[in-house]
Amino acid sequence: MSWTDDRVEILKKMWGEGKSASQIAKELGGVTRNAVIGKVHRLGLSNRSGGATAAKTADKEKPAAKPKAPEKPKVVATESDPKPANTPVKVMPRPKLVVTAGQPLPPQPSANEISPEALASVREVEKKAKKLSVMELTERTCKWPVGDPATEDFWFCGLPVQSGKPYCEAHVGVAFQPMSSRRDRKR
DNA sequence: CCCTGATTCGC
DNA sequence: GCGAATCAGG
């Protein structure tokens, strides 16, 4: 695929509308978002603003190394003995209630009422959920539990989380509700 | 990891 | 001019 006037025009239009490069690429077809961005730059409309005289970052620094924050406080609650000797404590085969490491579990909706819209979106999400098991959960899979933990019919949503938060978009919606909406609903 | 745009550089 | 690879950020 090449940049015909036709396609360039679509590019300009969509970019002007604030569409993302990937969206534009998808629309045009045959090009990647990189191609779109590259073209955008060559066309000189990288800055969506009109005539910003912003000198921007004229001079770039090239730090030879990546500082990459020290971080990782990581709270380790258990285990402090480096030498467990030979005392292979029998594994307790019945942790009645399985709690995912560290992460706070959401209050189960159970009998509680949630916003109809949010509830609806959750129902829909559950249909395309990835149904992950506990081990499959990662830092960025939605940790919203579905079903009864006591049965086989239990899994975690597993969809991509919404940055930072432990849940996907839909579940964030039902997990973090303003108290205003749940007020007076009971009565 | 999902995404965004920005830049570089071989083609 | 092109765009994949890379970089930098959310």
Image (spheres, coloured by chain):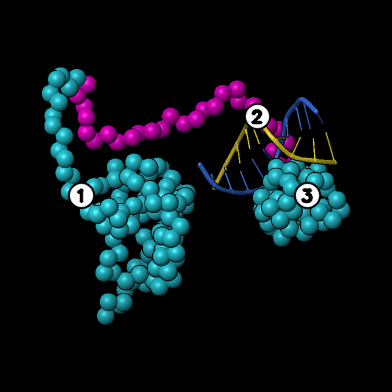
Chain colours: A cyan, B blue, C yellow
Task: Determine the residue located farthest toward the front in the rendered image.
Answer: A152
Residue type, mark 3 in image: Leu
Q: Which of A89 and A77 is in front in this view?
A: A89
Residue A151 horizontal/vertical position (percent): 24, 54
The residue that mark 2 highlights is: A61
Residue A83 horizontal/vertical position (percent): 19, 19
* Residue under the image location 18 percent in, 44 percent down: A95
Q: Residue A10 carries which label?
A: none
* Residue under the image location 28 percent in, 69 percent down: A112
Q: Looking at the image, do the residues carrying marks 3 and 1 touch, with CB atoms under 8 Å apart?
A: no
Q: Mark 2, chain letter?
A: A
In the rendered structure, which segment of residues is drawn in magenta? A55-82
Q: Mark 1, chain letter?
A: A
The residue that mark 3 highlights is: A45
Residue A126 magenta-highlighted: no
Q: Which mark is residue A97?
A: 1
Q: Distance between the residues labelled 1 and 2?
A: 52 Å
Q: Looking at the image, do the residues carrying marks 1 and 2 touch, with CB atoms under 8 Å apart?
A: no
- SS at mark 3? loop
- SS at mark 2? loop
- SS at mark 1? loop
Magenta stretch, main secondary structure class: loop
Q: Distance between the residues labelled 3 and 2?
A: 24 Å
